[in-house]
Amino acid sequence: MARGIELDRSRYPLVVMRAGEHYTQDDWDLLMRGMIQLIVAGPFGFINDTRGGQMPNAVQRRAIAQMYVDHERQVRAHMLASGIVGDSRLVNGILTALNWLKPPPHPVRVFSSITDAERWVLQHFNFELRQQVLAPSVEHRVG
């Protein structure tokens, strides 16, 4: 993905975000609105695939922090776990710094692959939520 930000809800309640190497502030604002919708809607797990994407700037990082403040009750209740996929020490460094400032109200861990992140995030789901993610879609069940 070269441009924009994708918030993939196709396997909800497991949600995957992928940011391109170039995205605009409008892309970021759309992402934040989507995240707030998810947080308010109900339990979900989140994977942030940072590989190849640009890192959020200071304004965007503050928007994340503000989202946590403004929706703290729902974040605590609904964001079950966040797996960050990255191949950069910068990602680990930023995550460590953010955790020092204010530890997140949900489990967060960095992985080098989507598969490992997904396995870990799904461990934080109850049986029913896990089944929603793992069940084949209607198209795959027919035939």
Image (cartoon, rainbow, N blue to C red):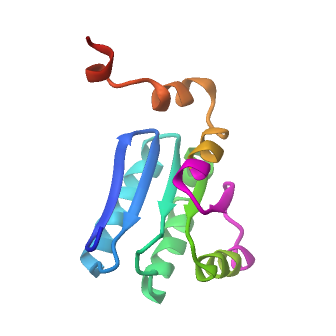
Name the image quarter holding residue 90: bottom right
Q: Where is residue 21? Give x, y as percent.
A: 34, 78
Nearer to the camera, 19 or 87: 87
92, above or below 59, in the image: above
81, above or below 10, in the image: below
The residue drawn where x is 49% and y is 29% is 134
The residue drawn where x is 56% and y is 54% is 75
The residue drawn where x is 54% and y is 73% is 65
Q: Where is residue 6? Give x, y as percent.
A: 32, 60
Nearer to the camera, 43 or 18: 18
Q: Where is residue 123? Give x, y as percent.
A: 67, 39
Residue reaching furthest to the bottom:
58
> Taking the image as drawn, is residue 80 in sight?
no
Magenta residue check for 138: no
Q: Where is residue 1? Give x, y as percent.
A: 30, 67
Name the image quarter holding residue 5: bottom left
Residue reaching furthest to the right:
100
Which residues make up the magenta segment? 99-117
43, above or below 24, in the image: above
The residue drawn where x is 47% and y is 51% is 39
Report the number of numbered marks: 0
Nearer to the camera, 59 or 19: 19
Magenta residue check for 102: yes
Which part of the image, by quadrant, shows the C terminus?
top left
Nearer to the camera, 115 or 22: 115
> Taking the image as drawn, is residue 127 in sight?
yes
